[in-house]
Image: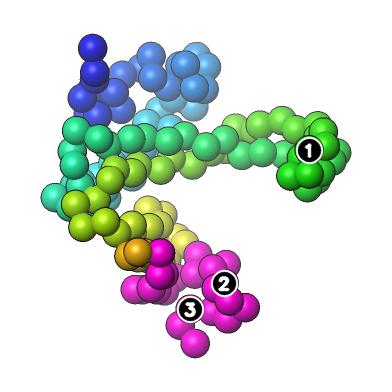
Amino acid sequence: MKKNIEDLIDSRSFYVELFGENQQVIDSKKRMLHKAWNLFKQNFLHLVHRERVFIVSVPNRVEILGKHTDYQGGETIVLTGPKNFFAICAPSKDDSSELMNADPLLGTTVLKFHTGTPLLITEGVGSQYYVHSGKKTDE
């Protein structure tokens, strides 16, 4: 049975499966995901196929040894830490992709991709990391 997104992000078992039983961690992750979900609903839900909305939880990755060797088939020693980020995504009705930072402390960077061409809509701290063809997109 498919779960409604709101039911999923309010479900304790969702967070326990990802982060364990620590209630403080669960509460923190739940606040983080609710913030991302509210931003997604406000800005994008009307532009996507609601029945195909996905939540992605990406843990941070600490590479102890072997940085970049895994890209060439080598081995690494990695572990995950307590930090992560959530991404909420869905296929859009207009065949475009838009990326928005949900953390106001990092600015309001928004990138929009339509048929593969990136467009920097607004700029915040996160935009300084986006490079295309060796130049910043706003130059």
Question: Looking at the picture, which amino acid does disc 1 mark?
Answer: Gly
Region rendered in magenta? 116-139
| Quadrant in the rendering for residue 67 | top right
Give the alpha-carbon distance from disc 1 to disc 2, as whole Å: 26 Å
Q: Secondary structure at mark 3?
A: loop
Residue 68's place in the image compared with 106, above or below, is: above
Residue on which the image places disc 2: 131
Residue on which the image places disc 1: 73
Q: Secondary structure at mark 1?
A: loop
Residue 65's place in the image compared with 127, above or below, is: above
- Residue 82 inside the magenta-drawn segment: no
Q: Residues within 10 Å of mark 2 (few under 14, many from 20)?
A: few
Please tell me which of labels 3 and 2 falls first in the chain.
2
Q: Which mark is residue 137?
A: 3
| Residue visible at 30% across and 27% down in the picture | 9
Do the numbered discs 1 and 2 sit on residues whose CB atoms are within 8 Å? no
Q: Going by the image, does 28 lie left or right of 63? A: left
Residue 20 visible here: yes
Question: Looking at the picture, which amino acid does disc 3 mark?
Answer: Thr
